[in-house]
Image (spheres, grey):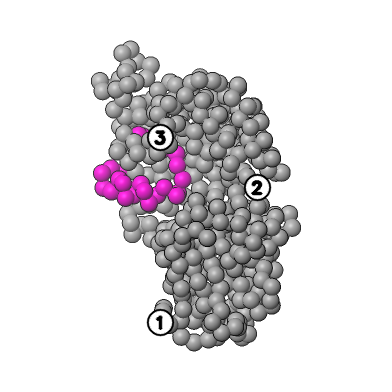
């Protein structure tokens, strides 16, 4: 097993006492495990583990069931998953993302949670819940979710007399709202803009838009906004469609036309655009809610920044949505099965997720916690009220080896941003290689 930090949450350690039924979950029926036995729950985030401690202590107080919380690093987590699936040694409950759900589900050890949670699922955001629906049921209790957003340096945008609230792009037009604003935001050391005589791209003081080959923040939303898809309903890679090619070439052209940082530089440094924004040198950064902590801490009070919807295309705005869910592993005995079910119901209720919302760890999956999440960010002087549940969303990678396939594709797509090839040439090759990687 990889090195792990284990936190044992017991009634003694957490200062709670009493054994009873979990109100609203199991009626008056207590849950019992053999003396000294406990449930195991695994996550990949130290911050989430700390946030869960109070919640799980309350669960123990309500049920008498102790929970041992394991934390693995991201790399160790996914290296350990297939080993535990093969050895049938998975923890009772573990965090899951969509890219690895199919692999875990194929092992035949996961609990279908639809009947376990019942009407509780109606209180969760559909955009997160639906990511864990396979054709034969619901296989996860969503905890938190993220979506791509556009953040703007409001001072630079105002100086350019622009508006970042509803930007659009159109690969078929000679220009559009995004290109116009990016051009106005891009200024060299002498105050010249791209297209003006003497403009020096190597001496840019400010940059326009974060056009770089980031699957979640940029590629996924732009391809979907143009009408394309990264994968079809069966999980087959389909990004090399006419719409996908147009969207990727459009983004690469923004960099080639100096309306975005150099493609060569963003490929070699994936964090470049975010760093430029934090430094006050980038007007528009398309990223995700997962970056809010880094932005808030990095910017401080240096300048005003605001949150807006992602750039929209012919098919509107399509932010890419990720969600993390708690999945249950089917035990061999009935008593343990009921204990796992109680824990999953607890994690699906507002009390079980409240500490995550209060600590601003993703957007809460439980609708009742949204206002607390907004207020928590307001306390940190960040206004997230503009973030709405999207009506249309781009989906994250799904299926066994989808993450490997996407990484393979991005290596080929990087050449488009470096100016070594075109999207017309590279995307079909990238798609073929991605499909081969999925097997």
Residue at x 61% of width, y 76% of height: 339
- Residues in magenta? 282-304
Q: Which residue is mark 1?
A: 15
Towards the viewer: 418 or 141: 418
Residue at x 63% of width, y 35% of height: 434
Q: x and y percent of residue 222 in the render?
A: 54, 35
Disc 3 and disc 1 in contact, CB within 8 angstroms: no
Q: x and y percent of residue 194 in the render?
A: 37, 19
Label ID, residue 146: none
Towards the viewer: 54 or 314: 54
Q: x and y percent of residue 159 in the render?
A: 30, 32
Q: Which residue is mark 2?
A: 400
Characterize the local packing of mark 1: few (<14), some (14-19) or many (20 or more) Cα atoms within 10 angstroms. few
Position of residue 13 in the picture relative to residue 221 (left or right): left
Q: Which residue is mark 3?
A: 269
Q: Is residue 290 magenta?
A: yes
Tell me if residue 356 can be seen: no
Task: Report, in whole angstroms, how far the alpha carbon at label 2 lies from the one at label 1.
Answer: 42 Å
The C terminus lies in which quarter of the figure?
Answer: top right
Residue 273, relative to residue 119: is it above or below? above
Q: Earlier in the sequence, mark 2 or mark 1?
A: 1
Q: Is residue 106 magenta?
A: no
Task: Report, in whole angstroms, how far the alpha carbon at label 3 lies from the one at label 1.
Answer: 47 Å
Tell me if residue 343 can be seen: yes
Q: Earlier in the sequence, mark 2 or mark 3?
A: 3
Residue 31, relative to residue 433: is it above or below? below
């Amino acid at each position: 097993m990889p090195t792990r930090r284990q936190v044992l949450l017991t009634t003694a350690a957490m200062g709670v006492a009493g054994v009873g039924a979990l109100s609203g979950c199991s009626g008056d029926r207590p849950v019992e495990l053999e003396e000294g036995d406990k449930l195991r729950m695994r996550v990949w985030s130290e911050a989430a583990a700390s946030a869960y401690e109070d919640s799980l202590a309350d669960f123990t107080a309500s049920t008498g069931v102790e929970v041992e919380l394991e934390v693995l690093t991201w790399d160790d987590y996914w290296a350990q998953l297939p080993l535990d699936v093969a050895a049938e040694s998975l923890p009772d409950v573990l965090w899951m993302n969509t890219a690895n759900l199919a692999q875990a589900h194929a092992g035949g050890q996961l609990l279908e949670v639809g009947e376990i949670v019942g009407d509780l699922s109606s209180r969760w955001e559909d955009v997160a819940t639906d990511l864990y629906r396979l054709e034969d049921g619901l296989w996860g209790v969503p905890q938190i979710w993220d979506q791509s957003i556009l953040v703007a340096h409001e001072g630079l945008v105002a100086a350019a007399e622009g508006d970042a609230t509803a930007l659009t792009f159109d690969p078929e037009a000679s220009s559009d709202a995004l290109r116009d604003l990016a051009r106005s935001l891009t200024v060299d050391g002498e105050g010249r803009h791209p297209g003006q005589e003497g403009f020096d791209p190597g001496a840019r003081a400010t940059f326009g838009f974060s056009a770089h080959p980031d699957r979640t923040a940029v590629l996924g939303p732009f391809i979907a906004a143009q009408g394309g898809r990264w994968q079809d309903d069966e999980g087959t890679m389909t990004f090399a469609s006419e719409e996908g090619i147009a969207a990727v070439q459009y983004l690469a052209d923004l960099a080639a036309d100096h309306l975005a940082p150099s493609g060569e530089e963003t490929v070699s440094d994936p964090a470049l655009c975010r760093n430029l924004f934090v430094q006050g040198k980038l007007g528009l950064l398309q990223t995700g809610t997962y970056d809010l902590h880094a932005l808030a801490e990095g910017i401080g009070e240096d300048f005003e920044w605001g949150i807006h919807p992602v750039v929209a295309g012919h098919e509107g705005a399509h932010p890419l949505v990720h969600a993390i869910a708690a999945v249950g592993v089917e035990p061999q005995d009935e008593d343990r099965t009921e204990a796992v079910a109680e824990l999953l119901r607890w994690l699906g209720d507002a009390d079980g997720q409240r500490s995550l919302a209060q600590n601003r760890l993703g957007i809460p999956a439980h609708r009742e916690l949204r206002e607390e999440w907004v207020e928590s960010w307001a306390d940190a002087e960040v206004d997230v009220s503009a973030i709405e549940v999207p009506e249309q969303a781009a989906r994250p990678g799904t299926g066994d080896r989808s993450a490997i396939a996407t990484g393979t594709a991005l290596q080929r797509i990087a050449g488009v941003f470096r100016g070594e090839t075109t999207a017309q040439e590279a995307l079909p090759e990238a798609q073929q290689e991605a499909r081969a990687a999925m097997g």
